[in-house]
């Protein structure tokens, strides 16, 4: 597909925008505000700012924000230099957006056409915005073609996810060459960030899919949020990020200190779930609904009594309970960092995949499952392969989209996202 067929900014305009937002990367000094007289804009209070630069990308170990807006992009340009320009432009934009600053108007000032920053967050807090970027398998090689001369640098761990039992993946909600996850404590801030980055792709890439998500507001800081099934979600977490989250020297140099993202859009048959008795719901999950404690225990963070039986000799936590199948003790010690969000996309016509196979208008709502790990071949893939076959929860959930992405290590000041990937390739 030729660039000329794409509406919006021309490639020449994109280069101008890159210069406007800081083509040298590592921006400093006051920035032009989105006002007619281009008065200086100051960064927001530092307590609301998560630094963009660092050893690792922000948005992974960052304390989880209350909202997310995730996007995947397809690159349609065949030119390596275009991709490098886009990554430089995105880096400069991300530096400004996460600092609470607008992406500057195009060269020519506020009256320039097109105006780059849409302005819906002017005067707002950055709300701990983080932007986390990744590269999908098709970014390296697609249909057997080394697209940008970097196929040799594709990590062995960046594999295509197999088709799991029960998958009903929608193509328009699956895959992508590039991923960006915006997380913030304000949904408008998260959406604004993706909106600006999407506008900066014109002539090079286009949106493939997006998904918003949210967390419940906990009663007290540090408490576990509840998902749409009413259960606490995220009690079990990774214990050693160095061991389980960050890629080590087994990965290519550009990925060491990075992580592998797996995201799955999971629709939950809430209407069906809501008809189940409380005891059955708790048996399905393996936890008490109100407290979050494992069945047979008193407190949320008590260890799972996986070897404990009831008076009849049956496991207190069923063999096919969700928490048993997801626990590291039943997965060769494998752990991954979960950063899931609930989603609600209204209603549409659907057919449930389990009896009574009800058809009709139902909620398109559920879980945006997000996890980071050192190697998906030893964590998500074998873990979910087992869960897809045996988990009691399967009668209520259907995986409809998502993808896998290599998330490189953090960006140093003066460099751009993926710079090492394109160096001397």
Image (cartoon, rainbow, N blue to C red):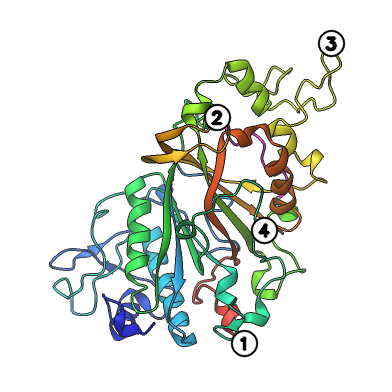
Outermost residue toward the top? 311
Whether residue 18 sits left or right of residue 343 in the image: it is left
Q: Which label number is shown at residue 223? A: 2
Up the image or down, 112 lies above or below 224; here it is below
Please tell me whether mark 3 or mark 4 is closer to you in this view: 4
Q: Which residues are magenta?
A: 231-240
Whether residue 92 sits left or right of residue 422 in the image: it is left
What percent of the width, then of the height, locates residue 289?
Answer: 59, 21
Q: Residues within 10 Å of mark 2 (few under 14, many from 20)?
A: few
Which residue in the protein does label 1 denote?
Answer: 425
Quarter of the figure that contains the C terminus: bottom right
Q: Identify the residue shown where x is 23% and y is 59%.
A: 119
What percent of the width, then of the height, locates residue 26?
Answer: 44, 73
Which residue in the protein does label 3 denote?
Answer: 311
CA gap between label 2 and label 4 equals 35 Å
Do labels 3 and 1 touch, CB within 8 Å? no
């Amino acid at each position: 597909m030729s660039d000329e067929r794409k509406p919006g900014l021309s490639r020449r305009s994109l280069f101008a925008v890159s210069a406007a937002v800081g083509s040298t990367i590592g921006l400093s000094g006051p920035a032009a505000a989105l006002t007619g007289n281009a008065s200086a804009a100051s960064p927001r209070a530092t307590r609301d700012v998560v630094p963009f630069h660092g050893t690792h990308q922000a948005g992974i170990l960052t304390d989880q924000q209350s909202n997310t807006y995730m996007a995947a992009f397809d690159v349609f340009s065949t030119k390596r230099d275009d991709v490098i320009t886009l990554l430089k432009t995105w880096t400069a934009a991300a530096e400004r957006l996460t600092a609470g600053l607008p992406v500057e108007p195009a060269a020519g000032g506020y009256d320039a056409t097109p105006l780059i920053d849409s302005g819906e967050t002017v005067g707002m807090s950055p709300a701990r915005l983080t932007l986390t970027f990744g590269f999908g398998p098709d970014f390296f090689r697609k249909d057997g073609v080394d697209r940008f001369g970097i196929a040799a640098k594709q990590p062995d761990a960046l594999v295509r996810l197999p088709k799991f039992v029960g998958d009903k993946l929608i193509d328009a909600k699956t895959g992508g060459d590039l991923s960006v996850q915006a997380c913030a404590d304000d949904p408008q801030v998260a959406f604004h960030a993706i909106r600006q980055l999407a506008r900066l792709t014109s002539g090079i890439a286009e949106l493939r899919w997006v998904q918003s998500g949210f967390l419940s507001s906990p009663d007290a800081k540090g408490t576990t949020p509840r998902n749409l099934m009413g259960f606490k979600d995220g009690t079990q977490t990774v214990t050693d990020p160095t061991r389980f989250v960050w890629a080590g020297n087994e990965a290519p140099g550009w990925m060491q200190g990075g992580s592998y993202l797996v995201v799955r859009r999971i629709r939950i048959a809430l209407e069906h779930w809501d008809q189940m008795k409380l005891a059955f719901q708790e048996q399905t999950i393996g936890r008490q609904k109100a407290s979050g404690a494992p069945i047979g225990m008193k407190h949320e963070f008590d260890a799972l009594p996986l070897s404990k039986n009831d008076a009849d000799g049956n496991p207190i936590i069923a063999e096919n309970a969700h928490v048993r199948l997801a626990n590291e003790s039943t997965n060769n010690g494998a752990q991954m960092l979960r950063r899931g969000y609930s989603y609600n996309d209204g209603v549409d016509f659907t057919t449930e995949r389990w009896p009574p196979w009800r058809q009709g208008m139902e909620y398109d709502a559920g879980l945006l499952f997000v996890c980071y790990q050192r190697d998906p071949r030893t964590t998500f893939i074998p873990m979910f392969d087992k869960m897809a076959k045996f988990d009691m929860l399967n009668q209520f959930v259907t995986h409809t989209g998502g993808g896998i992405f290599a998330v490189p290590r953090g960006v140093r000041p003066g460099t751009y996202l993926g710079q090492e990937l394109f160096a001397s390739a």
